[in-house]
């Protein structure tokens, strides 16, 4: 038996995740962060999270730090040598030493947290010291603490992350400049370094202190990589290497055959990636591969290669707000941050995918009203939803359709559309507490409502029912706002008063009820009380800090698996 109340919701948000079949794809929802919330520019090229949990966004017009509420912008200032070297921020990386590296189109920067400033790292392409180019394309760190910097003119290795020890690879000065434009660098689980360039894929293996390089290129043979312009490389949770290309789709490397399996867009097949222009990739906590492309996001199950594609939907405010995806990043909480080229930041929180929004304003065949007062689940796993103004909506999980039960004025109808609480009891009937309509009970077998009016003789309007629970002996306890607490017989055909003892303020209005074995918890406007059904006694709960009865206004009660009781209060927060 199940019943909960949630007041003053603008939208009905129903948790239906557990009802989806294995073939049904849950909707992926996004929050959005743009210039209207302080972002310096809508084109987001890079994302990272620092040691403090702050999110950093690189745009074409400055660096942004986000604390979850506010954005601080860092930009180049000609008169300040401690400012960012350039506003076009191409890459951001937080290393194991908790340093934040920022790559731009005009140099590399190291963030100085203490002074909230930047140290600019010089590029000296023609000398042994300094970086091979000032155009920074990508940044990463290997398991040995080395920093790898991909540039327009080769790959740079900072030994142990030290700025004084720069080793250069694949630059024009070294004679292997065919691979100079380094677009992506990734270390695999074996410590090998994979390098994506504009002219092929490289695998660097450290042997006796020196890196030996294997080149993978498209030479027109079966099993070759699909293209030579490599845009991104990642390794999934199953230790598979995935390689994205600029215009020829996605590749999966087979370490045994040393060949590649291709994944490309096909207009004739919906189970393909959404575009062949791969910009970036990330692996979520479930092990799925997120693929950011020119035309949206593809989420791939790396076991069976099934694909879910995400694109902008003008009818869905929670959809991806722009299809041109430039960066994907998974934070420490498992949220996926999406940098788009014209839509700013899109954020998918791990818990958001379990919810589907049903909004009356979007569809008249949806829920009766957007103000939800309670839920009850019946023996068929359908949901009975109480609304404040629209009566009751029955949601059939199998057909995903709604049926309305409202006050039509008939003798067998619901007596009020202002529903305050609902409970599906052991008698397989729906019990409904209303405002101005008393207690109603619906029998699905007869399709009729019956009402109980607890008002006294001086009242013309039936009492408001604020809460209903069923005890372990199958009796109902019903809280009214003007006429106290009622308790039924086990057959639920008759009710009598359940009187509060003198020790409990008689003016207390019950706002929440919860059953815990033989005990019933009462949350009221004047505190928290316990009724023991076995002994027929009430107990006052003390505030141990003040050694006196709790006198909080209690709105809701909940119990954890560890048997801890939480009280939600009005103006006093959450109590344990």
Image (tube, rainbow, N blue to C red):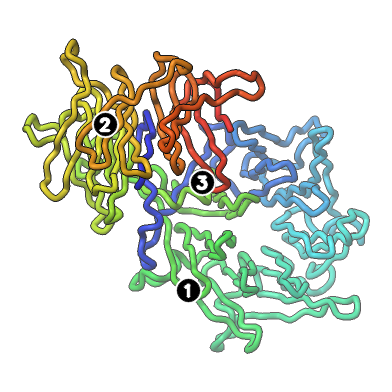
Q: Residues within 10 Å of mark 3 (few under 14, many from 20)?
A: many
Q: Which mark is residue 346?
A: 3
SS at badge 1 = loop
- Distance from label 3 to label 1 (Cα)? 25 Å
Residue at (59, 62) in percent of width and height: 283
Closer to the N terminus: mark 2 or mark 1? 1
With 9 as the anchor, is 160 left or right in this view? Answer: right
Q: Position of residue 318 (x, y in %)?
A: 41, 45
Q: Residues within 10 Å of mark 2 (few under 14, many from 20)?
A: many
Q: Residue furthest left?
A: 410
Q: Position of residue 171 (x, y in %)?
A: 79, 67
With 197 as the anchor, is 149 left or right in this view? Answer: right
Q: Residue furthest top?
A: 458
Residue at (80, 54) in percent of width and height: 96
Residue where numbered disc 1 is placed? 305
Q: Residue furthest front?
A: 535
The answer to which quarter of the image holds residue 144 is: bottom right
With 359 as the anchor, is 211 left or right in this view? Answer: right
Closer to the N terminus: mark 3 or mark 1? 1
Inspect this view and state whether residue 13 appears. Answer: no
Of residues 478 and 403, the one nearer the viewer is 478
SS at badge 3 = strand
């Amino acid at each position: 038996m199940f019943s909960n109340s949630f007041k003053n919701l603008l939208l009905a948000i129903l948790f239906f995740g557990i009802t989806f079949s294995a073939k049904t794809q849950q909707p992926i929802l996004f929050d959005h962060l743009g210039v209207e919330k302080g972002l310096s520019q809508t084109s987001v090229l890079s994302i990272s999270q620092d040691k403090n949990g702050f999110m950093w966004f690189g745009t074409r017009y400055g660096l942004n730090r986000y604390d979850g509420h506010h954005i601080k912008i860092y930009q180049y200032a000609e008169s300040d040598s401690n400012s960012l070297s350039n506003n076009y921020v191409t890459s951001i990386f937080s290393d194991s030493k908790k340093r934040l590296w920022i790559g731009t189109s005009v140099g590399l920067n190291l963030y100085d947290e203490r002074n909230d400033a930047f140290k600019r790292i010089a590029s000296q392409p023609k000398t042994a010291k300094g970086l091979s180019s000032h155009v920074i394309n990508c940044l990463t760190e290997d398991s040995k603490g080395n920093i790898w910097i991909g540039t327009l003119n080769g790959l740079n290795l900072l030994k142990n992350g030290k700025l004084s020890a720069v080793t250069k690879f694949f630059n024009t000065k070294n004679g292997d400049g065919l691979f100079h434009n380094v677009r992506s660098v990734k270390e695999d689980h074996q410590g090998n370094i994979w390098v994506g360039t504009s002219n092929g894929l490289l695998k660097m293996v450290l042997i006796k202190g020196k890196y030996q390089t294997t080149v993978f290129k498209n030479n027109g043979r079966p099993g070759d990589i699909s293209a030579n312009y490599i845009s991104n490389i990642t390794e999934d949770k199953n230790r598979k290497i995935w390689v994205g290309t600029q215009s020829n789709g996605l590749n999966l490397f087979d370490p045994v055959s040393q060949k590649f399996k291709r994944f490309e867009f096909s207009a004739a097949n919906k189970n393909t990636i959404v575009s062949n222009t791969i910009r970036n990739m990330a692996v979520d906590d479930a092990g799925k591969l997120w693929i950011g492309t020119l035309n949206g996001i593809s989420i791939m199950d790396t076991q069976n290669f099934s694909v879910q594609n995400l694109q902008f939907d003008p009818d869905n405010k929670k959809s991806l707000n722009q299809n041109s995806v430039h960066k994907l990043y998974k934070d420490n909480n498992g949220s996926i941050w999406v940098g788009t080229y014209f839509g700013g930041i899109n954020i998918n929180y791990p818990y958001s995918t379990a919810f589907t929004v049903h909004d009356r304003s979007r569809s008249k065949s949806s829920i009766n009203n957007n103000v939800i007062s309670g839920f009850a689940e019946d023996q068929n796993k359908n949901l009975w939803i109480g609304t404040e103004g629209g009566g009751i909506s029955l949601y059939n999980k199998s057909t995903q359709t709604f049926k309305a039960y409202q006050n039509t004025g008939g003798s067998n109808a619901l007596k009020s559309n202002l529903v305050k609480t609902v409970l599906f009891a052991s008698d397989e009937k729906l019990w409904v507490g209303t405002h101005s309509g008393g207690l109603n009970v619906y029998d699905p077998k007869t399709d009729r409502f019956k009402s109980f009016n607890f008002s006294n003789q001086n009242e013309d309007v039936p009492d408001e029912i604020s809460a209903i629970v069923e005890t372990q002996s199958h009796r109902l306890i019903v809280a009214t706002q003007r006429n106290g607490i009622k308790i039924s017989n086990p057959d639920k055909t008759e009710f009598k008063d359940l009187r509060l003892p003198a020790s409990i303020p008689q003016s207390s209005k019950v706002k929440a009820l919860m059953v815990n074995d033989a005990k019933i918890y009462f949350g009221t406007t004047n505190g928290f009380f316990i009724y023991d059904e076995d002994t027929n006694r009430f107990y006052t709960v003390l505030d141990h800090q003040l050694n006196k009865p709790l006198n909080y206004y209690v709105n809701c009660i909940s119990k954890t698996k560890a048997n801890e009781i939480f009280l939600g209060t009005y103006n006093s927060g959450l109590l344990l």
